[in-house]
Image (spheres, rainbow, N blue to C red):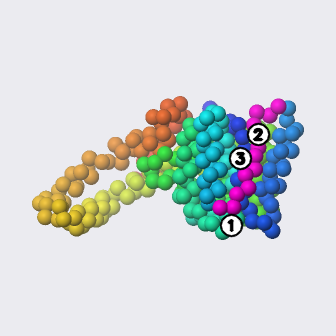
Amino acid sequence: MDDMGSFVLEIDSIEIIDSVPEGELQTGRELHEHILDLRTAIDDPPWTVARHKISSHGELTKVLTDLAAAAKLEDKFPLIHLECHGASDHIQLSNGDRVTWSDVGVPLRDLNRSIRNRLIAVWAACEGIYSIMSMVGGITQGTSIRLIIGPGDKVKAGKLVDAMKRLYSTLIACPNVDAAVEAAAKIEPSIRLFKAEDAFTHAYIDVLRKSSATSKREYVEDLVTKAKNEPGLKNRPRIHHDVKRALKEITPATYFEQAKRTFFMLDHFPELEGPLSFLTFEYVKKLAKV
C-alpha cells in the first residue's frame, strides 16, 4: 500500500485460471491474448502471464497448490485471475463441478501464506465478489486473500471481459489497484474492490452485535442446554454461574487483538503491522455503533 492507503500492484505474474466451457465465448483466452499484447508493448516487463485451462475441482486445487509451492520456492508473487461461471455461494467449472467459495478458500489460504498475505484475486465470474466468504473462513483463521476484485451481480460475458481488459490496461499503465477498479467499473458498474480489512471489520462487527446483552443471555442458555446433555456435566451444580463467569472473561475487546493477529498472520508477517495500525477495537466498535 502507498501512503494514501491505495493498493499498488507488486506482482511477478498474472495467472489466468480458465474454466469456461467449450462452445461459449472464450473470455479467458481473449483476456490472455490481450494481456500478452500489453506485455509485448513494454520493454523488459518484470512480470509474466500464463493461462491454465482446467475443467474440474481437482485441477483447480492442483493449479493453486502448484502456484503456492513455486511462490514459496522462488519468492514469487502471482496475481490470480479466475474465468468461470459463478453464483453467490459457489463457482461452476467447465465439467459441471460446483465448488463453494469456502472450499476454494483452503488452497487459496496456503497460497496467500506463501506470498506473505499479499494475494490479489480477480474473479471474472458472476457475483465473484462473494468470494469474500473464502476470505473469512471463520475469523480465527488466516485470510485466504488480501484483496478481491469481481462483480457483485450477474453479468454478461462480453461486457465483463471488456471491463477486465480495461482493468488490466489501466493497472499495467499505472499500477494503482483502486484506480484500475474504478476504470473497469465504468464499463461494468457491478465490479468492486474488497479488502481483507473490510472482511475482518464486517465479521467483527457481527461478533460485537452478537455480544449484546440479549445475545449473551441466549448464548448462555444454549451452552447450558448443551452442557446438560453431556453425561459428565448434566448434574453439575451452579452450571449457569460457571458458564457466565467463563464468558465474562472472553470479551470482544480482549479477543480483538488475538483475532486480528491470527486473521492477518501478523506473527508471521510483522511488516503488515504498520499498514494495519488503523484497525483497532475502538475503530470497529465505532463502525458497529454498539
Q: Mark 3 — residue?
A: 15
Q: Is residue 221 above or below residue 191?
A: below
Q: Is residue 5 above or below residue 129?
A: above
Would residue 107 be visible to someone looking at this image?
yes
**Element under label 2?**
strand
Question: N-terminal of the two: label 1 or label 2?
Answer: 2
Residue drawn at 39 percent across, 41 percent down: 258
Question: N-terminal of the two: label 1 or label 3?
Answer: 3
Point out the stretch of residues depicted in magenta: 44-56
Residue 138: x %, y % from top left: 45, 53
Name the amino acid, label 1.
Asn
Name the amino acid, label 2.
Thr
Name the amino acid, label 3.
Glu
Q: Which mark is residue 144?
A: none
Q: Is residue 255 left or right of residue 57?
A: left
Residue drawn at 67 percent across, 63 percent down: 93
Residue drawn at 45 percent across, 50 percent down: 139
Q: Which mark is residue 95?
A: 1
Q: Mark 2 Cα within 10 Å, few/some/many (few <14, many 20+)?
A: some
**Is there a contact, CB below 8 Å, between mark 1 and mark 2?**
no
Q: What is the C-alpha distance between the residues marked 2 and 3?
A: 8 Å
Q: Is residue 54 left or right of residue 258?
A: right
Q: In the rendered image, which quarter is residue 146 located in? A: top right
**Element under label 3?**
strand
Q: Mark 2 — residue?
A: 48
